[in-house]
Image: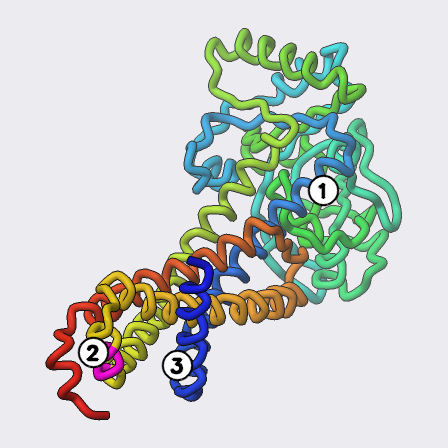
């Protein structure tokens, strides 16, 4: 069997070499499709890895509370869903959770879109109404200045590194002022540049402005539209206790479980699932190029069958079975697609890292991604090479021998 397979493989290699031009064009068609799939999968894995690292950096002792129920398909982010309804989370919930013995730091997150104006600039940006505890629960280091004091009545703000440049034209805007919602705020702090808008808070802190939670409630006409409450426990060991206590507390306060408390890998699952589904959709689009590559394989194989009709007749006349003829042409098709798959994986690596130069995270390549990409290429070769192989096997040996090349 091994010798027979070697003969098939040798014949396939010889056939592909005899038609190098067609082989090259067909291989490139498959390679482009595989490169697209590989790139998309690697970038999606990179997003997940980036979010997981954030959880590890803060020690794995953080849980988040989100209103309502997140769809199981992960297509809707909690922040987006929150924009279409009233949050079930209130300021009273934040205060109650803060009183739990297992809670070390508790920070609400309420996002507000607003127009920011200075003497020379005006732009629309995201304001995050929160407390100074957000820095503890999200690992937000300050580059300059300080966080606002929760007990202060002054309008103070901490700005992201990029919005500081966009709004004030400098990376050191300490003491400068801006106006929003007819209120004047003074900048007292600047966050370190994070360059990573993908996080479990669903906030791009480089382009956001942090204000005191009280001021945010005023902008919402006294209502608390809280998208998320971050809870940091005293340690990883006490996190489960904090989650259990917070769950029981909120169920008692709300009368029902109209909220979610996520911790560990669950914190990243919603954002990761969103990108996962986006990757699937993009991969489906990339599959169109694979379809084109598959049609190219079928085309070159049909041409090969037509050109080698007499060869098929000779093989069948000396005893070759239909299965032998099918195997011969199918191995040729699989070899063609496998070469295209290997080339596509290499191209995918190059494309992924090239695209990542303009993104906030690096692509991740695993053996599962490589195996999946090569597996897809082989399946394409098998599917689109099967019909030409069967067609060759069905040829009448007598009619085949009458045909001259």
Give the number of the mark in front: 3 or 1: 3
Secondary structure mostly seen in the magenta stretch? helix
Pointer 3 local density, CA inside 10 Å: few below 14, some 14–19, many at least 20: some
Give the residue number, with chain letter if any, for mark 2: 313
Q: Which residue is mark 3?
A: 15
- CB atoms at circles 3 and 2 under 8 Å apart? no
Q: Nearer the viewer, mark 3 or mark 2?
A: 2
Percent position of residue 189, x then y: 83, 47
User: Which is nearer the eye, 143 or 189?
Assistant: 143
The residues colored magenta run 309-314
Residue 116 placement (x, y as % from top left):
64, 54
Figure check: 399 above or below 161: below
Spatial CA span between label 3 and label 2: 17 Å
**Precedes in sequence: disc 3 or disc 1:** 3
Q: Secondary structure at mark 2?
A: helix
> Could you say which is closer to the camera, residue 362 or residue 245?
362
Residue 62 drawn above or below residue 198: above
Q: Which sits earlier in the primary sequence, circle 3 or circle 2? A: 3
Please give the name of the residue rendered at 69% of the width and 52% of the height, measured from the top-left corner.
196
Disc 1 residue crowd, few under 14, some 14–19, many 20+, Cα 10 Å: some
Could you say which quadrant of the image residue 140 lies in? top right
Position of residue 386 relative to residue 239, above or below, is below
The part of the image, by quadrant, that contains residue 210 is top right
Q: Earlier in the sequence, mark 2 or mark 1?
A: 1
The residue under the point 69% across, 24% down is 231
Q: Quadrant of residue 25?
A: bottom left
Q: Residue 56: image x %, image y %? A: 74, 36
The residue depicted at 86 percent of the width and 42 percent of the height is: 146
For label 1, the residue is 53
Q: Is residue 390 magenta?
A: no
Q: Are marks 2 and 1 in contact (CB under 8 Å)?
A: no
């Amino acid at each position: 069997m091994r010798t027979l397979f070697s003969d098939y493989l040798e014949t396939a290699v010889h056939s592909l070499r005899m038609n190098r031009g067609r082989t090259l064009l067909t291989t490139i068609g498959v390679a482009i499709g595989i490169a697209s799939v590989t790139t998309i999968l690697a970038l999606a894995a990179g997003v997940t890895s980036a979010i997981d690292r954030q959880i590890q950096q803060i020690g794995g002792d953080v849980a988040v509370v989100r209103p309502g129920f997140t769809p199981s398909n992960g297509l809707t982010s909690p922040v987006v869903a929150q924009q279409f309804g009233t949050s079930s989370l209130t300021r009273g919930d934040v205060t109650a959770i803060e009183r739990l013995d297992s809670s070390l730091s508790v920070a609400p997150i309420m996002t507000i879109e607003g127009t920011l104006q200075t003497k020379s600039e005006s732009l629309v940006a995201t304001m995050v109404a929160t407390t100074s505890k957000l820095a503890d629960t999200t690992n937000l280091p300050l580059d300059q200045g300080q966080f606002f004091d929760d007990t202060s009545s002054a309008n103070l703000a901490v700005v992201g590194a990029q919005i500081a440049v966009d709004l004030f034209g400098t990376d050191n805007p300490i003491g400068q002022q801006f106006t929003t919602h007819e209120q004047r705020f003074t900048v007292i702090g600047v966050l370190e540049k994070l360059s990573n808008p993908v996080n479990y808070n669903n906030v791009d802190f480089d382009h956001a402005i942090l204000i005191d939670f009280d001021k945010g409630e005023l902008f919402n006409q006294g209502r608390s539209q809280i998208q998320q409450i971050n809870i940091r426990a005293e340690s990883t060991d006490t996190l489960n206790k904090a989650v259990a206590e917070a769950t029981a507390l909120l169920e008692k306060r709300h009368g029902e479980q109209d909220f979610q408390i996520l911790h560990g890998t669950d914190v990243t699952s919603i954002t990761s699932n969103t990108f996962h589904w986006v990757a699937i959709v993009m991969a489906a689009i990339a599959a169109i190029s694979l379809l084109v590559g598959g049609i190219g394989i079928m085309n070159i194989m049909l041409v090969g069958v037509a050109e080698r009709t007499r060869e098929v007749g000779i093989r069948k006349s000396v005893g070759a079975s239909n299965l032998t003829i099918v195997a011969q042409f199918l191995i040729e098709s699989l070899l063609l697609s496998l070469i295209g798959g290997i080339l596509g994986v290499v191209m995918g690596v190059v494309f992924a890292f090239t695209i990542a130069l303009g993104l906030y995270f690096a692509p991740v390549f695993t053996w599962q991604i490589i195996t999946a990409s090569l597996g897809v290429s082989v399946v394409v070769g098998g599917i689109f090479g099967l019909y030409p192989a069967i067609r060759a096997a069905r040829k009448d040996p007598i009619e085949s021998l009458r045909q001259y090349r």
